[in-house]
Amino acid sequence: MANKFATKFGVVMAAAGSAVGLGNVWRFPYLAGQNGGGAFLLIYLVCILFVGMPIVLSEFVIGRRSGQNALEAMRTLSGSHRWDWLGIMCVVCGILFISFYIVIAGWCVRYLSLSIFHAALPDIANTLIALALNVGIIWFGVEKGIERISTLLMPLLLIILLMLVIRSLTLPGSGEGLKFLFTPDFSKITPSVFMAAISQAFFTLSIGLGCMLTYAAYMKKNQNLIATATQVVGIDTLVAIVAGIAIFPAVFSLGFSPAEGPQLVFSVLPAVFAEMPGGSIFMVLFYILLLIAAITSSISMQEVAVAYFDEQRHMPRRKAILLTTGIIIVLSVLCTISCNSSINLCGRSLFDWFDYLTSKFMMPIGGLAFAIYLGWFYPLKDTREELQQGSNLKPWFWHTFLWTIRIIVPIAILAIFINGLLA
Ligand code: PHE
């Protein structure tokens, strides 16, 4: 990934490829289902707008300004080693993240083989198949190829989701589902709903672990950062909402419980496909596309760690891939086992711990640090200059952005943290 992106469209697609993934189709619906539907959606959208979007922009500014990976970027901009912890946290977060994310990608492999062969391999095999796909792409350096493929295939995923929307909406009693998703019941808003919504904003936008920062390092100076961030955030939010509209009407019509948890999408969608003419073919296509969406996200997580060992530790790239893959194999196998057993640590399985630690702690802390650094420590004129490159920066936008990263983002993240810990 050492070159600049060739086209502005390519950058949007690569960043959107990282953002759009299991977070939109699998995690958003199940969290919305568990946290009161409309109430969750409302708070989630507020988090995306006032916390997610400013952090995407902050990572873009830091990444393009420095042209480096997260650790080196902070060293270059700050001229010191004081922010090294942040770079290291990004690397650790990337590894923990992919170790449980690849398990869910493995569920896609499982449902894919169930829909084709009506049989499935044991879960550990599915996890390892998903991981092999991920590593194969990184090893052979075909990220550029996958970018091109996903530019073609991601719109197709959206089309299948839209077909599911139509089927779901025409099921009897589907109105209940729409009401659930779009009518906020304010009595359902609790500190844990805020915590779930903010963690989802970080998860789905791939922020707080230097992923967006790394992509921005490859952007050209004439790329409009504001427009790019708006497009990436817009596409990501659109896919999540469409997934919600595909799922909730069916949940209510077919008698599932919206609060079913992580298995929600995997149990509801096959039931919807069963109600469609040619459903089994669409189901195969859907799981292939979802798996590709997951892999375009997971390669960007491993890349954070590979870039660190490669660029910072001067390890040959292939050695860096082997080392990170070794660690990921051990952790993801443990995660897979933990999902299927009753072994747990303080009430959570290892899988839950990794999800919890990354999206509820490390990513919010990472995002908070990027925003605070830019808002309070880095010369404002440099940030402004970087935002102006390639875009027509309006004064109102600059001031809103500045005060959002200086005040709103820190207060929101800290308040939600403290509330969540006390709850
Ligand atoms: N945003 C991705 C998704 O929604 C997950 C992801 C998180 C990707 C962090 C990269 C880094 O599935």
Image (cartoon, rainbow, N blue to C red):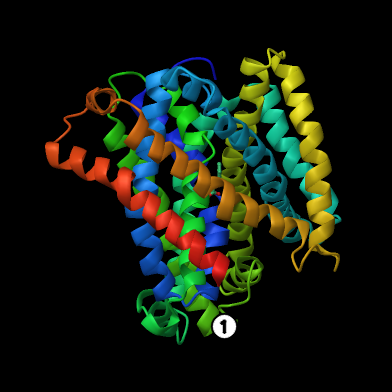
The one of 221 and 165 positioned closer to us in this rendering = 221
Residue 262, picture quadrant: bottom right
Number of residues whose C-alpha sits closer than 10 Å to that of mark 1, classed few (under 14), some (14–19) or many (20 or more): some
Residue 302: give x, y in percent of width and height.
65, 33
Q: Quadrant of the N terminus?
A: top right
Above/below status of 35 relative to 305: below
What residue is pinned by disc 1? 254
Name the residue rendered at 24%, 28% in the picture. 384
Residue 329, picture quadrant: top right
332 to the left or right of 239:
right
Residue 142, picture quadrant: top right
The image shows a total of numbered marks equal to 1
Name the residue rendered at 44%, 46% in the picture. 155
Above/below status of 139 relative to 171: above
Q: Secondary structure at mark 1?
A: loop
Q: Amino acid at mark 1?
A: Leu
Above/below status of 174 relative to 89: below
Name the residue rendered at 83%, 64% in the picture. 340
Residue 311: give x, y in percent of width and height.
62, 16
The one of 263 and 308 positioned closer to us in this rendering = 308
Q: Quadrant of the C terminus?
A: bottom right
69 to the left or right of 358:
left
Q: Is mark 1 within 8 Å of ligand 1?
A: no
Could you tell me if residue 299 is visible in this image? no
The one of 109 and 349 positioned closer to us in this rendering = 349
Could you tell me if residue 313 is visible in this image? yes
In terms of image quarters, where does ligand 1 lie?
Answer: top right
